[in-house]
Amino acid sequence: MFGILIALALSPVLGGVAALLLIRAARAVAHRATRRWRAPVRAGEWGMSGALAFSHGANDAQKSIGVIAALLLAGGQIDTLAAPTWAKVACAAALTAGTALGGWRIIATVGRRIYHIRPEEALSSQTASAGVIFGSSLLGAPVSTTQVVATSVVGIGVGRRRWHHVHWSVVRNMGLAWLITMPVSAVLGVLALELWRLVT
C-alpha cells in the first residue's frame, strides 16, 4: 500500500525533473540549430508519441486488469491472478475509446493551458514522460500518466527559465484535484462496499 502511494507521489516529481534536465541538455547541444533541425524534431515527436502511448497502455491498462483479475479470483472464476485474455482486450479497448472520445479536454489543458509548448520542448516532455511511465511499469508501480505528463510540461517551462510563462493557477488547480481524488475515491469505495453488504 505504502509502495503504491510512494510511486504515485514520486512519479510527477520525476517527470518534471527529467523534462527539465532534457530540455536544458537539448538547448546546450542545439543552441545554434537551424531550420534543418525541424524535420528530425518532428520525426522524433511522432516516435516518442508512440512510445508515450505504449507506456500509457502498459501502466494504466494494468490497473484495470488487476482489479478485474482480483474480482474474478475472489469470485472463484479463476485460480490465479493471471487475467484472462478477454479482460486484457476489454481494458485496452476501453482505454483507447476513453482517450479518443473523452480525453481531449485534458489534452488541451496539458498541451496548451499550462505552458505554450514548442516542438523541441514537446519532444523533451514526451521523452521524459515515456521514460518515467514505462520505467514505473517495469517496476510494477502504478502511476498517473496525466500527472507525469503535466509535471513534465511544467519542468519544460522551468527549464527554459520562463517561470512567468507557466500558468501557475492551472497548475495549482490540477494539484488540488489530484490531492482530493484519492481520499474521495476511498470514501466512495467504502460507501459502495457498505451499500453492497446491505443489499446482499
Image (cartoon, grey):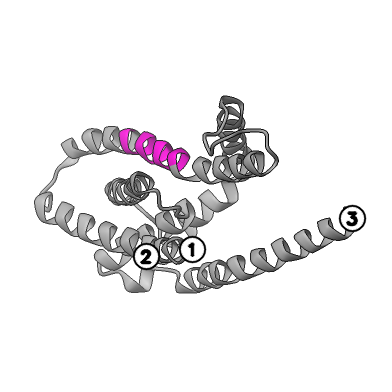
Residue type pointed to by label 3:
Val
Q: Position of residue 148 (x, y in %)?
A: 41, 56
Instruction: Determine which residue is flagged by label 2.
Output: 10
Check the image and report above or below for 121 versus 81: below
- Closer to the camera, 20 or 69? 69
> Contact (CB < 8 A) between labels 3 and 1?
no
> Contact (CB < 8 A) between labels 1 and 2?
no
Instruction: Determine which residue is flagged by label 3.
Output: 199
Residue type pointed to by label 1:
Met
Q: Position of residue 152 (x, y in %)?
A: 35, 58
Q: Position of residue 123 (x, y in %)?
A: 29, 45
Q: Position of residue 7 (x, y in %)?
A: 40, 61
- Closer to the camera, 92 or 86? 86
Q: Which residues are magenta?
A: 47-58
Q: Calculate the distance from the C-alpha at mark 3 to the C-alpha at mark 1.
A: 29 Å
Asked whether residue 55 is drawn in magenta, I would say: yes
